[in-house]
Amino acid sequence: MRSLHSTVMSRTLTPIDQLLSVADQSLRTVWGHHQAGRAVPRPPTSTFDEAASRPLDEAERRLSGALMRVDHVGEVCAQALYTAQALVTRDGALRAQLQAASREETDHLAWTAQRLRELGDRPSLLNPLWYLGAFAIGTAAARLGDRTSLGFVIETERQVEAHLDDHLARLPASDLASRAIVEQMRDDEIAHAEAAQQAGGVRPPVPVRWLMRAAAKVMTTTAHHI
């Protein structure tokens, strides 16, 4: 007997079905427990030397927790962006591409949430706000057309790549577990940007890129503490 999920996926979704699916995914993203499709990245055994494998002190733990909270917020926003863009586009192939990227971002969401728990820290208290803002931005970009929507993906992922590189430079040297997660996330974001570019995305104008960077700066600075 087929599951309800299989039955729903086997037919064309009505607008109401789509809205209910988006609402369900949104609630799960902000408040649910996330199950990754891939195992949590772990550092190679060869990297564990006496200096690098020592326990984190309290200052290092707080720093790692704050940086991982910011990364978790980024994944909440990524879910909102991809969900909105997939909802608006009428191109089935593009929708499938966006949904595939969203599934990888769900892995990131689960990994960062797990690492936060391991560090004894918590997600941002403002996650519902971040999600709503990113969903609105994703919807607006998608309504400008698929090439613009894909261009927004390219620019977003490139900015995220730079942001993750910065975190790799700032994470405590002994926090190999967090570093392994961030490195895999960075590789995935690079792949998402390349896929969007190959699909015909056009990067936004320079002023729009500046605005995106400014908005991201506000979000990351706030999420570092709240």
Image (tube, rainbow, N blue to C red):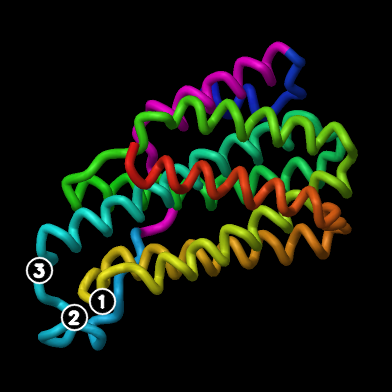
Residue that badge 1 annotates: 173
| Res 119 seen here | yes
> Could you tell me which secondary element the residue under label 2 belongs to?
loop
Span colored in magenta:
16-39
Q: Is residue 124 above or below residue 74?
A: above
Q: Is residue 137 located in the magenta-colored stretch of the structure?
A: no
Q: x, y percentage for residue 125?
A: 35, 30
Q: x, y percentage for residue 95?
A: 76, 41
Q: Nearer the viewer, residue 188 or 2?
A: 188
Residue that badge 2 annotates: 52
Q: Nearer the viewer, residue 121 or 30?
A: 121
Alpha carbon of mark 2 to alpha carbon of mark 3: how far?
Answer: 9 Å
Residue shown at the point (85%, 54%) measured from the top left: 205
Alpha carbon of mark 2 to alpha carbon of mark 1: how far?
Answer: 6 Å
Whether residues under marks 2 and 3 lie with C-beta atoms below 8 angstroms apart, the answer is no
- Is the C terminus in the top left, top right, bottom left or bottom right quadrant? top left
Residue that badge 3 annotates: 55
Q: Is residue 26 located in the magenta-colored stretch of the structure?
A: yes
